[in-house]
Image (tube, grey):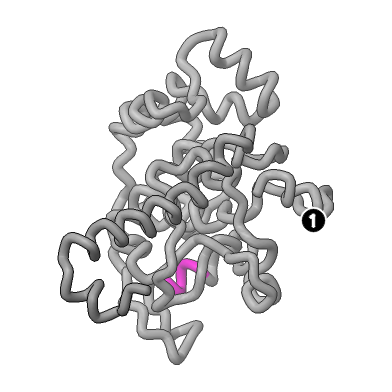
Amino acid sequence: MIKHENIETNAGLLIVLTLIVISIGGLVEIVPLFYINDTVEKVSGVRPYTPLELRGRDIYQREGCYLCHSQMVRPFRDEWLRYGHYSLAAESQYDHPFQWGSKRTGPDLARVGGKYSNAWHVAHLINPRDVVPQSIMPNYPWLQTTDLDYSDVQARMRALKRTGVPYSETQAEYDHNVATFGPETANKLDILHAEENLMQQALANDYDGQRDRVTEMDALVAYLQVLGTMVDFSRYDEGYFAEFR
């Protein structure tokens, strides 16, 4: 029987045993993946971001929001009760990079879409303590006064298209999106009409309360309002999602 002290004082033996343990752990994690056809759940409703939502996500990353907010509801009862259904891989399949994580200086935002009004988000971003007195979140007032730069939105969509996000440029790609997402969504995913679609969504919804301009606030609020809203969980039994674990 090898004593623990003998292992610690013998570098070669320690390395060998460490590699054995790591190998066993790796096999336990990796081997089951070869028997799973797909880890992305088959659900309806999940789509790529519209041009406006995409620019909002860019601003979300630029301002470092992900440093304090995760977008991952874990499959635990306390999180389910607070935030809603646990996050699915399918909900992040078009995210590059995805925003899953464990950093929660602020609350998780995976299901924040539709939870508050546009006006609430605007007030919260300008001065968080106006709506949450105990908040330690910094102010972001410039979002309301900075016009949104969307001159390169087509280039951003093309870059994501290279990673597999189904934005369309050809008629065949557009027709495929019509069959997959429906004509209304397919129109919003058309790269060639990205700027037009962005302006239309921003002005129609008036996220920032300023109908005469499109600001960075419009884009960020549009992004926040779509988080966690694409999947209708009432259509699925819990056992359905267990098939993909």
Where residue 60 appears, x then y in whole percent? 37, 56
| Mark 1, residue position | 238
Residue located 37% across and 24% down the image: 162
Residue at 64% from the left image edge and 65% from the top image edge: 75
Based on the picture, tell me whether residue 124 belongs to the magenta stretch.
yes
Residue 239 x, y percent position in the rendering? 81, 52
Residue 179 located left or right of residue 40:
right
Q: Is residue 11 left or right of residue 227?
A: left
Going by the numbered disc 1, the residue's amino acid type is Glu
Depicted 4 relative to depicted 83: above or below: below
Q: What's drawn in magenta, residue-wise?
A: 121-125
Q: Residue 6: image x %, image y %?
A: 23, 76
Mark 1 Cα-neighbour bin, 10 Å: few <14, some 14–19, many ≥20: few
For this rendering, which residue is in front, 8 or 35? 8
Instruction: In the rendered view, tell whether residue 18 sits above or below residue 53.
Output: below
Residue 51 appears at what percent x and percent y? Answer: 45, 37
**Residue that sits furthest to the bottom in the current view:** 134
* Residue at image point 61% right, 21% down: 177
**Main SS class of the magenta portion in the image:** helix
Residue 214 can be seen in this image: no
Q: How many marks?
A: 1
Q: Nearer the viewer, residue 78 or 193?
A: 78
Q: Give the quarter of the figure containing the N terminus.
A: bottom left
Instruction: Indicate whether residue 157 is drawn in magenta.
Output: no
Q: In the rendered view, would you say 48 is above or below 69?
A: above
Report helix, strand or loop for mark 1.
helix
* Position of residue 26 in the picture relative to residue 7 (left or right): right
Answer whether residue 95 is visible to the viewer in this image. Answer: yes
Name the one closer to the observer, 159 or 206. Answer: 159
Residue 229 located left or right of residue 25 = right
